[in-house]
Amino acid sequence: MKKLWPVLLLLMAACKQKEYNADLLVKNALVYTVDSTFSTANAFVVSSGKIVAVGDIDTIEKKYMARQVVDAGGKAVYPGFIDAHAHFYEYGLGLQDVKLVGLKSWQAILDTVNNYARHNTEGWIIGNGWDQNIWLNKAFPNKAKLDSLFPVRPVLLSRIDGHAAIANQAALNIAGIKPGQKIIGGTIETVNGKLTGMLIDNAVGIVTRKIPAPTEQITQAALLDAQQNCFAVGLTTVDDCGLPYTMVSTIAALQHKGALKMRMYVMLADQPENYDYLFKRGAYKTPGLNVRAFKVYADGALGSRGACLLKPYADSAKWNGFLLSTKAHFEEVAKKIAAHGFQMATHAIGDSANRVMLKIYAENLRGKNDKRWRIEHAQIVSPEDVKLFGDNNIIPSVQPTHATSDMVWAAKRLGNQRLKSSGYIYKTLLKQNGWMPLGTDFPVENINPMYTFYAATERKDLKGLPPDGFQTDNALSRAEALRGITLWAAKANFEEHEKGSIEVGKYADFVILDQDIMKVKGSALPNVKVLKTYINGVKVYEKK
C-alpha cells in the first residue's frame, strides 16, 4: 500500500491541474495577434477578462482548462476593432431622428421629412445626412418649400459632414437670425436680402443651442442603440470626439451598471466649462472610459467649402474658406492644454488650417515628444508642411473612407494638381512617425471598419471605382490598415498596453470574421461580416 502513495499523489496532482483555471479558451482559429512581429497563433486563453496565454493549442491545453470553449472553426480572429475618430453619441441621437443619407434630391429630402412628421407629431424635426454633391444640380437647397410644409414647427436638417445645415423660418425665428447677419467662423446665407435657410459651420450652432436638450431617456437610448450597431461591425472601442463634460458622468453610470459595455475614449469639446472640469479634476480613467483629451475645430469641411485653403477654391475663385476661431484662440488653447499635460486633437481639413495648427503645435511641443497631439483628418496638407508631423511627433488621425467618398468631387474643389500633391496623402503621412490611427468619422461615414480597411488598402468606393484605385501611391498595406484600426488606434489613446492586440495581459477584446481580411480578394473586403464580438472575453454580439 505504501508503494501506491506516490502514484496516487501524482494522479491527484494531475487531476488538480485539470481543474478549471481559465474562463475561456478560443481554439481552431487563425489568430492575428497584431503584436510587434505580427505573429499568428491558433489558440488563446482568457481569465478574468484578460488574455493569459496565446499560442499553440496543444501546448495551451496541457496547462489550461476553461469553463467555456469557443471553436472558431478555422476562422480568422482579430483584436477588437477601434475607431479612432467617431461621434458615437451623435450617431446614436441620429438613430432617433430623420435619416437623410443617400437621398438623391431635395424633393426626396422633403418627402422623407414630411413622412417622418406625420408619425412624430411633437417638437422639433431634426434630420441629418443630406449631401448636395449627390444631387443632380449639386447646389445648396433653399428653405422655401420647407417653410410651406412646416410654417410653425421648427426644422433643422444637417448636412452629412455636420458642418452645414438648413433651417426653416420657424427655427430661424426661434434662434433670432436675421438677413445679412454675420458670425465669425461661419456663414448665414442671404440672397437678395432674404435668408435661404443655409447655415455653415459656426452659424449652425446659433440654432442648435435653441433645441431642447435630449431627455435622459433619449440620451441612454442613443448610447445603447449606437453600441449595438457598433458591436455588430466588430467595434469594441470608439473615440467620441467633442462631447460636453456632462456626458462623462452619464457614460460612466451606464458602464457601471453594465448596460454600456463599449469602451470609450472621450475628447471634450473646446468650451471653457470643459477645460475647467478636466483641469480641476484631472484625467478620468477606468477600464471602460478614458477622458484626457480636448477636441478643437480649426476649420469646416471641404464639401461645404468651409475648409480653410492656402489658395482659393478651384470652383469658387475668390473663396478660401475660413478658420472657425482666431489664431490667437488656437494659440491660447494649445498653451493651456500643454501646461496641464493633456492631449490636443484638432479637426483640420484644409491646407491652410493644417499649416496654422501644425505650427502652433510645433511651438508647444518643441520637437520630439510623446504627448501624442493629434491632427484629426489631415485631409489636405501642403507637401512643405508634412515634415512638421514627424519633427514634432504629431499624429495624423485619418479616415480612409473620406478619400473614396470625396474623390468624385474633390478635384472640382481643389483642382487636379493640388488634389494629387496634397489630398488624402495617407501613406505619406504614415511615414512621418511610422504609425497612424484610422477611423471613420461616423455618422459622416458608415460605421463599418471593413469599409475603412477596404478604402485604405484598395482606395476604391463600394462600387469598385475607380477600377485602378484613387491615388494608389497613398494606399496602405493590409498589415498597416489592420494596425490602424487596432494597435495604432489604441496607441493614439495611450492605451496600447491594454488593448489593440491579442497579447498576454491585455483585455480580451476580439472579433471573429467570416473571411480572412488579410487574404481575400480586395473586392470582397466590404462584404466581410462579423460572426462574433467579445469584450473582456464575454460575447456581446453574434451574427444571426
Image (tube, rainbow, N blue to C red):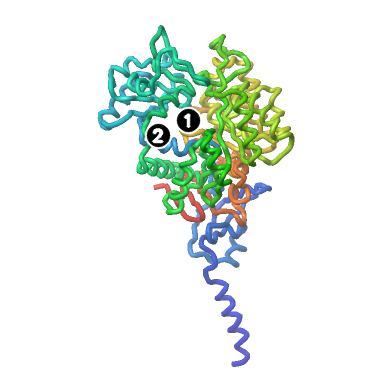
Identify the residue at the far bottom of this view.
1
Task: Decide if residue 16 is on the left or right side of residue 167.
Answer: right
Q: Which residue is mark 2?
A: 94
* Quadrant (top left/top right/bottom left/bottom right) for the N terminus: bottom right
Residue 40 in view in this figure: yes
Q: Secondary structure at mark 2?
A: helix
| Disc 2 packing (10 Å; few <14; some 14–19; many ≥20) | some
Q: Which residue is rendered at x = 53% and y = 71% of the image?
A: 19
Identify the residue at the far top of this view.
192
Q: Which residue is rendered at x = 44% and y = 20% of the image?
A: 199
| Residue 293, horizontal then vertical, whole percent | 58, 40
- Amino acid bearing label 1: Val
| Residue 369, horizontal then vertical, whole percent | 71, 39
- Amino acid bearing label 2: Gly
Whichever of callouts 2 and 1 sits on the residue coming sooner in the sequence is 2
Q: Which residue is mark 1?
A: 444
Q: Secondary structure at mark 1?
A: loop
Task: Decide if residue 362 is on the left or right side of residue 182.
Answer: right
Quarter of the figure with residue 224: top left
Residue 525 in view in this figure: no
Quarter of the figure with residue 347: top right
| Residue 304, horizontal then vertical, whole percent | 49, 20
Q: Which residue is rendered at x = 62% and y = 37% of the image?
A: 337
